[in-house]
Amino acid sequence: MSTREGKAPYEDVLMFLAICVIGGAYCYYSNREIPPFMNSLDQQQASPSVATKSKPLKASDHFSDHKHHLLLAATGSVATIKIPLILHALSHHTNLSVRLILSNSARQFLQAQSAEQPSLEEISKIKNLDGIYFDEDEWAKPWVRGDSILHIELRRWVDLLVVAPLSANGLAKVSQGFSDNLVTSVIRAWDFSGLIDGARPGVKLPYDSGKSAKDLEGLPEEFRAGGRKGIIVAPAMNTAMWKHPVTEKQLAVLEDEWGVANGGWFKVLRPMEKMLACGDTGSGAMRDWKEIVRVIEQRLELGGDADDDVKKG
Ligand SMILES: Cc1cc2nc3c(=O)[nH]c(=O)nc-3n(C[C@H](O)[C@H](O)[C@H](O)COP(=O)(O)O)c2cc1C
């Protein structure tokens, strides 16, 4: 049956319902930048383990692999985009195993949004990279007695931790002992005494134990080797953040109280001056990634030269 203008009576009702559905959808999505089905970030964050190659880490499984263990971490600075370059430059070392931690902010910089910012899926294919970890991985399954605890296993596993970049937020948290994410939990659980983890067979630890021969005498074999694990951080932030008076106070903890120069376990690669990503010029830029690679190679005695790697392409 048709009405005036040849329309069926239910057509007006259908039109009204369609307007309600479209209007409702618009109101919902206008509160988000991108509808979820178009947002690859949402998809990657929903499955944090997408880039993690390994099963739950047990440091003891890797005790006798005769490899140097580098834990690389990035916190929420734009300099996180140098992580793929650092990983590539280290990928030819046959005696190196690398694991990567990305803070939730750092992760935002590696979402395949530009050629120099590949996806985590791509990054996970780089040779020597044996795992990528996020905060969620600490809570991958409800913990029960007997399960491993990721930040402790990473601490046991690692010989050298390099946080490059360390954000202003990260610097503040580390210097004050906060441990509210995976990176800061590893740092907070660090064996600063050098008397908990010890050396693994055939692998020299990167720093001197700071103990006298007499102190070492009565210790078990793995500690008599005399080395100590270490943490290197490369802060990266806006010049105003770097110049803020609170920065010096925080650096004093890391360099004076915990610094390797004073018999400790911490080394700060202070930022350099250049035009920053935000357009400001001044100090605060992360040290050149090639220099960071060089420091890692020297500390772990890997041999090699980052400049050569770059020349080779
Ligand atoms: C696009 C963008 C770039 C940023 N770059 C920096 C930076 O270079 N250094 C820094 O300290 N913070 C930077 N921030 C701010 C940090 O991401 C923010 O303080 C965050 O909470 C740090 O978290 P995390 O240290 O726990 O990873 C930036 C934020 C945005 C949105």
Image (cartoon, helix red, strand yellow):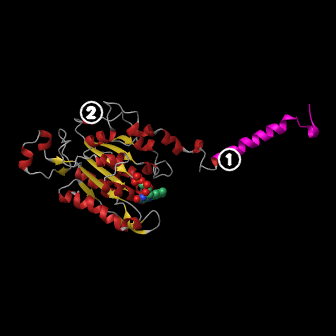
At horizontal 29% and vertical 62% (from top left) the residue drawn is 251
Q: Does residue 312 appear left or right of residue 226 in this picture? A: right
- Among numbered discs 1 and 2, the one appearing first in the sequence: 1
At horizontal 47% and vertical 38% (from top left) the residue drawn is 47
Residue 70 vs 281, above or below: the answer is above
The quadrant in which residue 9 appears is top right
Q: Does residue 163 appear left or right of residue 227 in this picture? A: right
Give the class, few, some or many, for how many residues have Cα within 10 Å of label 2's Cα (few <14, many ≥20): few
Look at mark 2 in the image and give the residue it sits on: 61
The stretch in magenta equals 1-28
Residue 235 vs 221, above or below: the answer is below
Q: Quadrant of ligand 1?
A: bottom left
Look at mark 1 in the image and give the residue it sits on: 26
Q: Does residue 25 appear left or right of residue 261 in this picture? A: right
At horizontal 64% and vertical 50% (from top left) the residue drawn is 30
The quadrant in which residue 198 appears is top left
Which residue is outermost to the right? Answer: 4
Is 16 a magenta residue?
yes
